[in-house]
Structure formats: C-alpha cells, structure tokens
Image (cartoon, rainbow, N blue to C red):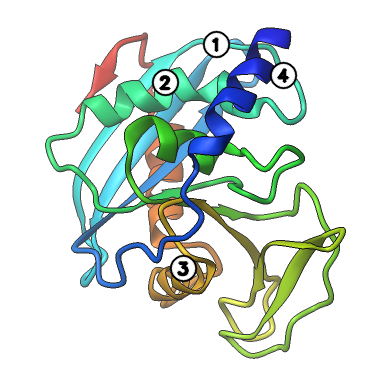
Amino acid sequence: MAGALAVQERLRPLVDLVGPGPTAPATVAGLDVAYAESGDRLAAAVTVLDARTLAVVDEAVSVGRPAFDYVPGLFAFRELPALLDALDGLTVRPELLVCDGHGLAHPRRFGLACHLGVVTGLPAIGVGKTPLVGQWSPPGERRGSWAPLRDGDEVVGRVLRTRDGVKPVFVSVGHRMGLDNAAARVLALTPRHRLPETTRTADRLCRDALAGGARGGRRG
C-alpha cells in the first residue's frame, strides 16, 4: 500500500489540468472493468467509437486477476494493468479516453482517469455513476443542467444531468482536458441514455467476456 501511495504522489504532478483537450475528437474510447462473483477474476474492456456516429470501430478485452487488493482510493492499481493490456490490443488509437470512474474527483486528486491519462499520454476524463468525494447541490432537471462538485473550497468536477429528470453523472478531468470540454464531450456521448455510449459498450464487452468464460490473455 505504501508503494502505491508513493506512485500516486510521484505521478500526480504530471497531470495536465489545463487542457483544453480535443473539442472534436474523431475517436473516443470507453474503458470499463467487470468482476466475477468470486472477485478473483476480472475482464477489462476498451471500445473505440466513431465520435460522430457512436459506432464501435475497434475493441479489445483482457481477462485475468486483479493486480491489487481492494483499497479505497487505490482502485486504479487493481484495474490498471488489465486496462493497459486491453489498450495495447487495439488497432485504432483513440483521441480521448472516457473512464468509468473518476479523475480529479478523488481523495488525493489522482483517480483512474488521471492515472491512465498520465501513463498513456492521452487526454482522459472520468464519468462516475456516484461521487467518491465532494459536496453538491442537485442540478436542474433538464438535460445539460449542471452543478459544481466541490471538495472543501476546490471544484473537483461537475454534476451533470444527461437526461431530463434522470439521476446525474459525475464528470471530472483526468488528463489534458478542461472541465467545460469534458462535460461537453459527455453530453455528446449521451444522446439517448444516462451513461455515455463509451461506457455502455465497454460494460457490455467486459461482462460478455466474463460470461463467456474467457481464460486470460487478450482479445482484440
């Protein structure tokens, strides 16, 4: 655990929070991880979507074992090796990573989206279903309404309504992106559902890999 904390401290200053990042990326990747009921196997999936049509143009999945015990605030270490393996299996290099998790909205300001962004050098954002840190007031009920996610005096993300009258999502910057642009990309990826299409397609892929009983390695 001490070693993981030291890695976070070493890499955190490398996060680019200025952005602004790509405003019209051609390709956007979703990253998600599913776990077997036993907890001893996982499948990490990456799907690359055409940002205009939201059609899947490439995908890869890596099935293996968690690389780290479950420790709050250090979740990235559990999933990062498998996600990087899946990214290596792609034939299309995405212009933006959209993580099912958090970036700056993390107790040490270095969530999964930050870690992946720094390691890969790619712009990255986090889109969480629930908050990890911070306080917030409910945004308006209409799609596109938002409220700041604050941790103390610091704005660490945005509480964004992607569908009218539906629970919001929690958007935070990971690397080489600005918060305004991150929220705009999330809205572009949610034309019909609460969660981005990147997350939805990656979720299906990793769950299918577990259900299919894949045994290790990766599939591009």
Residue 163 placement (x, y as % from top left) = 58, 80
Instruction: Report which residue position mark 4 lands on.
Output: 70
Q: Earlier in the sequence, mark 3 or mark 1?
A: 1
Q: Are marks 2 and 1 in contact (CB under 8 Å)?
A: yes
Question: What residue type is disc 3 on?
Answer: Val
Residue 162 shows in the view? yes
Q: Rate crowding at label 2 as few (under 14), some (14 to 19) or many (20 or more) other CA atoms within 10 Å.
A: many
Residue 101 placement (x, y as % from top left) = 59, 45
Instruction: Report which residue position mark 3 lands on.
Output: 186
Question: What residue type is disc 4 on?
Answer: Tyr
Q: Are marks 2 and 4 in contact (CB under 8 Å)?
A: no
Count up the numbered dots.
4
Residue 213 shows in the view? no
Instruction: Using the image, determine if residue 71 lies above or below residue 193.
Output: above
Question: What residue type is disc 2 on?
Answer: Ala
Q: Earlier in the sequence, mark 3 or mark 4?
A: 4
Q: Earlier in the sequence, mark 2 or mark 1?
A: 1
Q: Earlier in the sequence, mark 2 or mark 3?
A: 2
Specify the label residue 82 is tagged with.
Answer: 2
* Spatial separation of the CA atoms under disc 4 and disc 1: 10 Å
Under circle 1, the secondary element is loop
Instruction: Report which residue position mark 1 lands on.
Output: 67
